[in-house]
Structure formats: structure tokens, C-alpha cells
Amino acid sequence: MMGRLRALYPDADCELNFESPFQLLTAVIMSAQTTDVQVNKVTGKLFSRFPTAKALAEGDIEEIKEIIKPTGYYNAKAQSIQSCAQQLVLKFGGEVPDTLEELTTLPGVGRKTANVVLGVEFGQRGWTVDTHVQRITKRLGFTKNEDPYKIELDLQKLFPDDDWSLFSITIIWHGRRMCYARNPDCPACPLKDICPSSEV
């Protein structure tokens, strides 16, 4: 199955713009309830103004809000990314930690966000269960669970651990390009012959 998707999306990778672990972490936090495209519209300005955790931690919250406004929920997101930056400075010397346990102690960082950072920036295994992974793995019959953590556990049993991060990204690409929440393009899907939900 994954071979087919990898053949369809050989260049699948994280679609957020970033130049450091701190910038990736901040961008992922801002990606909640919006698209990577929207986040990428603001990160250039945000990171040129606040390129490090220390700079963001000490930044003017109103300026941060104004910059990230296009991502939606900007009041809460500004608080989250600044609080996260402050804790990075306070607890980790301004560096992003490379363990799930440490990452999830930071404000605004849950398992999904932590797994993105660990997989993309540190090359560690982990399933990123976002809305696309949740939808597609349910359609394929790999899980019946609604809870992202339980879905993660189900998927861990089915796939080799070396491939979890790459599988996550590839499935996310498929969700954004073909297996839509509404009106999925089943006729063009390379998985139509094995997908119980296929409309073909």
C-alpha cells in the first residue's frame, strides 16, 4: 500500500517553511485549524522579526498577534507560541528538545505536534495523526478509533517502525491531493482496489 502512495508522491515532505527546529515547532503550533499554506504566508515575516526562541519569548505580544492574524485564532496562537518560546528558553536554553516526553511539557505541544518535529527535524519514528491520517486510515479499515492516540497505537501494530514518519507525511499528502474529506477522487486513487470505502 505505502509503495503505491510513495510512487504517487515521491517528493512527499513537510510543507511548512522553516530553517530551524524552533521555527518548525512554532509553525506546527500555528498550523492548528488552518492550512500549511496560510502558515507559510506569515512565517517569513514572523521569523525575520523573531528568528530565535529568545527573540520570540521577549517579543511584543500585540506585534506577534498582528503578524500571525491570517492563520486564525491568532490571540490563542500568539499566547501559545510565545509561552512555548519562553519555556524553551527557561527549561532548555532556547533549544528544542528531541524527546516526546520533553516536547509535550511545552505549552501548545501535544503528541501530534511533537511527532511532527521529532520525525521531520530529528529523524525519529512516530505517527502524526492529523485529520488526514485519521480519515484515510479509517477509510482503509486500519482503525475504528476516533481518539488520535488510539489510532497511533493501531497503526504502530500494522507498519514497520522505521517508516512511521514517512508514512504519516505520505498519507497527509494523499489527503490533501486526492482522498478529500468530501468528494474523494476514488477513480484516480491507486488504493481503490484495496480500500473498503472506495466509491469506484
Image (tube, grey):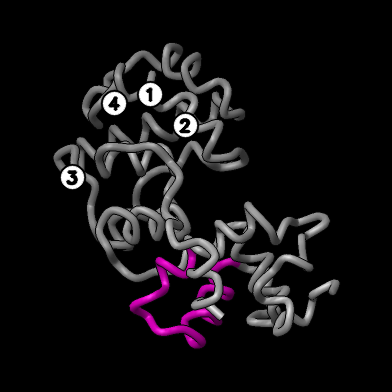
> What amino acid type is highlighted by mark number 2?
Asn
* Image: 110 above or below 50: below
Is residue 63 depicted above or below 78 in this figure? above
Left or right of 87? Residue 135 is: right
Which quarter of the figure has residue 114?
Answer: bottom left
The earlier-in-sequence mark between 1 and 4 is 1
For residue 44, which numbered disc appears in the image?
A: 1
In front: mark 2 or mark 4? 2
How far apart marks 2 and 3 lie (CA) works out to 26 Å
Q: Earlier in the sequence, mark 2 or mark 4?
A: 2
Residue at 51% in and 76% down: 2
Give the CA distance from mark 3 to mark 1: 25 Å
Mark 2 and 4 residues: CB-CB less than 8 Å, in contact? no
Graded by Cα atoms within 10 Å as few (under 14), some (14 to 19) or many (20 or more), the crowding at tag 2 reads some
Residue closest to the eye, 10 or 116: 10
**Circles 3 and 1: CB atoms closer than 8 Å:** no
Q: Answer with mark 3 or mark 1, whichever residue precedes in sequence.
A: 1
Give the mark toward the camera: 2 or 3: 2
Q: Which residues are magenta?
A: 148-168
Going by the numbered disc 3, the residue's amino acid type is Phe
Q: CA distance from mark 1 to mark 4?
A: 18 Å
Up-down: is 148 above or below 68? below
Q: Residues within 10 Å of mark 4 (few under 14, many from 20)?
A: many
**Left or right of 57: which side holds 65?**
right
The residue tagged 2 is: 40
Question: Badge 1: how crowded within 10 Å, few (<14), some, or many (20+)?
Answer: some
On the image, numbered disc 4 is attached to which residue? 57
Provide the secondary structure element on which disc 4 rests.
helix
* Tag shown at residue 92: 3
Query: If you read the primary sequence from the N terminus, does the residue marked by circle 2 or circle 3 appear first?
Result: 2
